[in-house]
Amino acid sequence: MKNYLSIHDIPDLNMAIKEALYMKEFPYAFAEAGKRKTLGLLFFNSSLRTRLSTEKAARNLGMNVMTLNVNSDSWQLEFGDGVVMDANKAEHIKEAAQVLSQYCDILAVRAFPGLKNKSEDELEIVLTAFETYASVPIVNLESSTAHPLQGFTDAITIYELTEKCRIENRKPNVVLTWAPHPRALPHAVANSFVQTMQRLDVNFTITNPEGYDLSSEVRKETKVSYNQNDAFAKPALSGAEGADIVYVKNWSSYENYGQVKSQDRSWMITAEKLKQTNNAKVMHCLPVRRNVVIADDVLDSAASAVIQQAGNRTWAAQWVLKNILKDGE
Amino acid sequence: MKNYLSIHDIPDLNMAIKEALYMKEFPYAFAEAGKRKTLGLLFFNSSLRTRLSTEKAARNLGMNVMTLNVNSDSWQLEFGDGVVMDANKAEHIKEAAQVLSQYCDILAVRAFPGLKNKSEDELEIVLTAFETYASVPIVNLESSTAHPLQGFTDAITIYELTEKCRIENRKPNVVLTWAPHPRALPHAVANSFVQTMQRLDVNFTITNPEGYDLSSEVRKETKVSYNQNDAFAKPALSGAEGADIVYVKNWSSYENYGQVKSQDRSWMITAEKLKQTNNAKVMHCLPVRRNVVIADDVLDSAASAVIQQAGNRTWAAQWVLKNILKDGE
Amino acid sequence: MKNYLSIHDIPDLNMAIKEALYMKEFPYAFAEAGKRKTLGLLFFNSSLRTRLSTEKAARNLGMNVMTLNVNSDSWQLEFGDGVVMDANKAEHIKEAAQVLSQYCDILAVRAFPGLKNKSEDELEIVLTAFETYASVPIVNLESSTAHPLQGFTDAITIYELTEKCRIENRKPNVVLTWAPHPRALPHAVANSFVQTMQRLDVNFTITNPEGYDLSSEVRKETKVSYNQNDAFAKPALSGAEGADIVYVKNWSSYENYGQVKSQDRSWMITAEKLKQTNNAKVMHCLPVRRNVVIADDVLDSAASAVIQQAGNRTWAAQWVLKNILKDGE
């Protein structure tokens, strides 16, 4: 694996899930794989899980880690081509990426979208610039349109949560549901989740209010329902037994790009609402706003898998770093 | 030791002092004790000594360290139960503490009080929430009401400074004195110092202006004098020879909670004033405002033990981490 | 080597260049030299290259590294002697430096000048205070008047870039040229470059607009030309073939201290202008403002050596740390 920019960079997702679970069981099985290799973690935005789980993963592989909060520790970066740099930005990404490539063996980058200009955000200016100018592999720690470490984590977690389906010899019913939120949030997590589910052998449905459809390029053939209750009770095209997995996430409107069109509290996930499902496990990438996105009675119940899911971030990152290191040998 | 939340968590303080001094002599005696263990340092407030000495201690034990400046690196945390999280706070402590427990084997937390609301501060909301929701041991890096790593450090330092008393076969005379400061400061350091002295075989006196008595629950039977000169000259109930140790600290009023009632410069510690003592050594947890809290002629003299004291932070932290690791085996 | 405060602290610069290039070839040749030693990196200002290359260098030597962004992580420091500290600054450098010396085996400090008051800046208050009060070696990560890690890096890079001159058995022609910049920048990099060139066997010329002469104490006998084209075409007193090395840097006026007297765009380095040189390689310490200081057609061409130069920061730092550790044995 050269870079890890999207979930599509994992060649065999089912095998990767099993390898990551092996690392979960034996965290130090590859404790020398990253010896004398340095991971650079570059944050243009806040991070808790990504920051710490990726560092932890690197350390488990014996790597050194250097973290840079770009805007506060370093210089403002310019990404435009041909710009006369006489304003606030002191350094161009061309230099920064090439320089960092000499200090680090892998660069991992988090840069959120502005959510003002769809086409600009979709250019993935920051991530693409690092990919273009760096001479070392790049890992996406959440960009404008994708959060593939989260997507892979979700695949691992769903595998763990659906043993009952394997016993019953049937596909899991997985529902991605929109939920309300006071702020405009990016589409990255939802996009990567959709793209991940499309690669797994699951019955997958998205449910969101009208006006909240994700990009058609991401959705492709995935069914969208505007009725959350229907989606929870009858998620698969085959009808059947109700959702096994309810994956909760807010995102701002894609059509009316970056706008908060609805804060409809009836979309909040509650214990009552989950009764319609097949005893579903509830997932969320965190951070989650309690009693806005998901109610306390779900998060504090056995239905919640959000902590287990966050724990799996380490193994997803460790698998990705291990496979990049391996191909760099 | 499960957690280290207060000085009371050390079962045998005199033995712990000797074990910490052994670590000071042989810093790498337990260099494998923390192998493949991770310490998470979580700062809600500024830190110099605590940040670096605790990291140093962990490294001496072979631990990995991940530091998070919570407010700038990560998300604002909500601590309230049942809150509808539709305002500024993106993540609830319930999730944060559980998630961090999966990345770290010990979590150490610094969170200062607001000094506006006594009963709220005394609930120790942040520390208690971590203790409640984390599944790993918690170390207090200074909370609203206690700074037990400082307290233990002070016990170690007083042991080092009072060899003359052991030779003379008498108890050391220890005085905790209030000193002026332009800002409202917490009671944490003073509280932990009082609680530490109450566990040692010393003659202990507190001196502060009227209106500055510490919490009676902390003071218990400890004598308080409103006359600093008396306290320095005749610290013990037994009368005797003057203070051997003068421990200096400002705190805001406890009665008129969080208020600065006095900036009486006559309480500043000067070389002249120390003449009344038994050639006392002067301690302060640092940072110290020169010529406000303690005069240059003390800090720049052989009477000052503040640097030695700060150096001992490492060994206090190392003892605490080592004992938590040991009990987690 | 006790401290590394200026390029003059390197006793034999030519030998040091060769030793640093040995480390570039064998980064882990001294992987145990810093075992159980801790480097403290203290930043009063932003940093990218210095922060990461110095950490990388330390890790290559097996050192532990603790980084402190002084103003955001810790307490505001007071540097004045005898000050009554009743304003914003909570800690005096006297304590901070002595305390840090107990946690770290080497302290490295970055503190930029205010550029308001020449004589104050030239006192090097921060660096001098650390040197005075710390009990461990001090490394200058860029102070008011010097950036000697950059100077040493430049010496290494020029050695690499001038093999042709060694083959032709002649001295390299090296030109330091001022270039325009919208902000008032320090003299540190230019000063250290001048002092480094004065110690190497090169023909060295400075070119800058009138009113931009560097300090005469730094320049000494070095020739200054106010005509950039002349300097590029005929850099050496001997006349000859044009510049082999063009080192570009902006600095604010020294005479009219800290002022931006000129933003004359005709001083920007362009491909056209380089035609006058002897196929010169272009160096800059970075960050560089494209199309203000140096044009895209230079930075994106084979003439640019800025990335190679930034890469050499690691080996300069590694040589310095290695030699300080060696003398501390």
Image: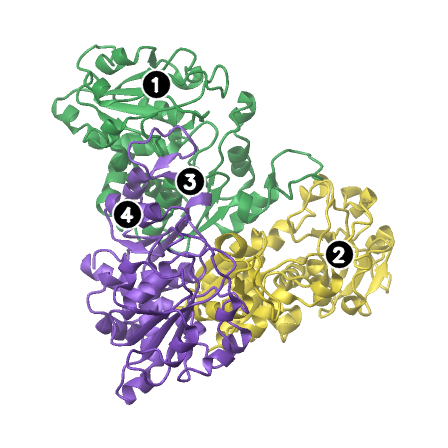
Chain colours: A purple, B yellow, C green
Q: Give the structural element (helix, strand or loop) at label 3.
A: loop
* Mark-to-mark CA distance, 4 and 2: 66 Å
Secondary structure under tag 2 reads loop
Residue at far left of view: C167
Q: Which residue is mark 4?
A: A128
Picture quarter containing residue B32? bottom left
Q: CA distance from mark 1 to mark 2?
A: 69 Å
> CB atoms at circles 1 and 3 under 8 Å apart?
no
- Residue B242 place in picture, x, y as percent: 81, 55
How far across and how far down the image is residue A276, in percent? 44, 82
Mark 3 — on which chain does it sit?
A: C
Q: Nearer the viewer, residue A136 or B280?
A: A136
- The residue that label 3 is drawn on is C47
Residue A32 in view = no
Q: Which mark is residue B244?
A: 2
Residue at left 39%, top 50%?
A: A113
Would you call the spot at circle 1 few (<14 residues within 10 Å), some (14-19), or many (20 or more)?
A: few
Q: Which label sits on residue C265?
A: 1
